[in-house]
Image (cartoon, rainbow, N blue to C red):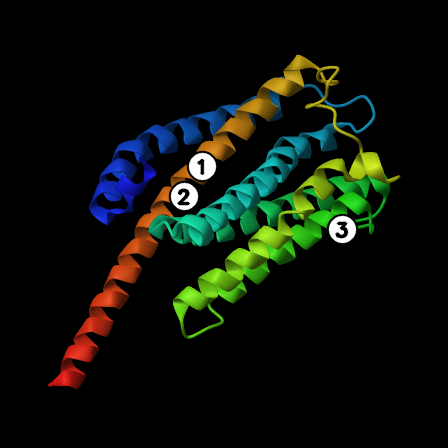
């Protein structure tokens, strides 16, 4: 079924249909999440007003892991089944995931200063997320490191698959090692450990960020497909001129 969307025209029709269903709900959910986070959720009894950074930091962290996993899966599909859209999807997702990871690191630093008294510590969770950020940057660099785009795609895809081992390390780092970072308080077997007034904006932001990612992903995939088509036409014209 997925092979039929290898046709650019068919994919563009699908993207045009889905984009409004992703973009408008994303905007509404993020706006609602920010409203509830700023005006309808209480300050933390220990952290005070600084806890509101959580409503951007935590969803950004979730998205950093989610996007990288999606990127790695796309790379696997591209390497194994040679689907033409798989590498494009991975290439489109990489800068979005890198931005989410950067936001996660920056908001974590802002949150850590009043709580830990420092902007940064070489904590297991923080260090592994920083490595994730470098993996994103390495993927983007390898994509454009070769004259042959196919070679760049393969090299970047291998890096993405090798780097996938960092995702469970990030998730379980607070369990495996003694870290300053607090353990999971939302997704846990015993149920969330925070109040529903804090859970609501957190989940609104998380769903909004996911829909925002899907919106950007489709837009970037369309742009990359157009760029490849233009490059292919340009190369064909150059070969035609050289043959004359």
State the residue position of label 1: 212
Residue in the picture at 78% in, 49% down: 119
State the residue position of label 3: 127
State the residue position of label 2: 216
- N-terminal of the pair, mark 3 or mark 1, is 3
- Percent position of residue 166, x then y: 68, 47
Can you tell which quarter of the image residue 203 is in? Answer: top right
Circle 2 — which element?
Answer: helix
Circle 1 — which element?
Answer: helix
- Percent position of residue 199, x then y: 64, 19
Q: Residue furthest left?
A: 244
Residue in the picture at 34% in, 52% down: 84
Q: Are marks 2 and 3 in contact (CB under 8 Å)?
A: no
Q: Which of these two is toward me, 18 or 48?
A: 18
- N-terminal of the pair, mark 2 or mark 3, is 3
Q: Residues within 10 Å of mark 3 (few under 14, many from 20)?
A: some
Nearest-to-viewer mark from 3 and 1: 3
Answer whether residue 90 is visible to the viewer in this image: no
Vertical side of 42 occupied by 145: above or below:
below
Can you tell which quarter of the image residue 211 is in? Answer: top left
Mark pair 3, 1: CA separation = 26 Å
Judge from the rendering whether residue 151 lies leftward or rightward of residue 98; answer left or right.
left
Judge from the rendering whether residue 16 lies leftward or rightward of residue 77; answer left or right.
left
Mark pair 2, 3: CA separation = 27 Å
Vertical side of 176 occupied by 233: above or below:
below
Circle 3 — which element?
Answer: helix
Q: Residues within 10 Å of mark 2 (few under 14, many from 20)?
A: some
- Percent position of residue 122, x then y: 82, 51
Give me the disc on residue 151: none
Q: Residues within 10 Å of mark 1 (few under 14, many from 20)?
A: many
Q: Are marks 1 and 2 in contact (CB under 8 Å)?
A: yes
């Amino acid at each position: 079924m997925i092979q039929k969307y290898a046709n650019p025209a068919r994919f563009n029709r699908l993207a045009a249909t889905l984009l409004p269903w992703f973009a408008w709900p994303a905007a509404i959910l993020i706006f609602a999440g920010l409203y509830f986070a700023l005006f309808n959720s209480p300050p933390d009894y220990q952290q005070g007003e600084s806890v509101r950074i959580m409503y951007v930091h935590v969803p950004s962290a979730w998205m950093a892991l989610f996007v990288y996993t999606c990127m790695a899966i796309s790379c696997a599909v591209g390497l194994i089944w040679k689907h033409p859209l798989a590498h494009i999807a991975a290439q489109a997702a990489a800068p979005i995931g890198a931005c989410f990871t950067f936001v996660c690191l920056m908001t974590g630093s802002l949150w850590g200063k009043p709580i830990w008294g420092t902007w940064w510590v070489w904590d297991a969770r923080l260090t592994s997320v920083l490595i994730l950020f470098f993996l994103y940057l390495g993927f983007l660099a390898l994509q454009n490191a070769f004259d042959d785009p196919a070679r760049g795609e393969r090299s970047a895809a291998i890096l993405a698959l090798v780097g996938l081992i960092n995702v469970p390390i990030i998730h379980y780092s607070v369990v495996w090692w003694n870290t300053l970072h607090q353990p999971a308080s939302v997704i846990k077997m015993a149920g969330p450990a925070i109040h529903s007034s804090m859970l609501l904006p957190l989940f609104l932001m998380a769903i909004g960020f996911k829909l925002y990612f899907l919106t950007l992903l489709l837009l970037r995939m369309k742009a990359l497909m157009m760029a490849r088509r233009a490059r292919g036409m340009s190369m064909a014209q150059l070969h035609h001129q050289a043959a004359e």
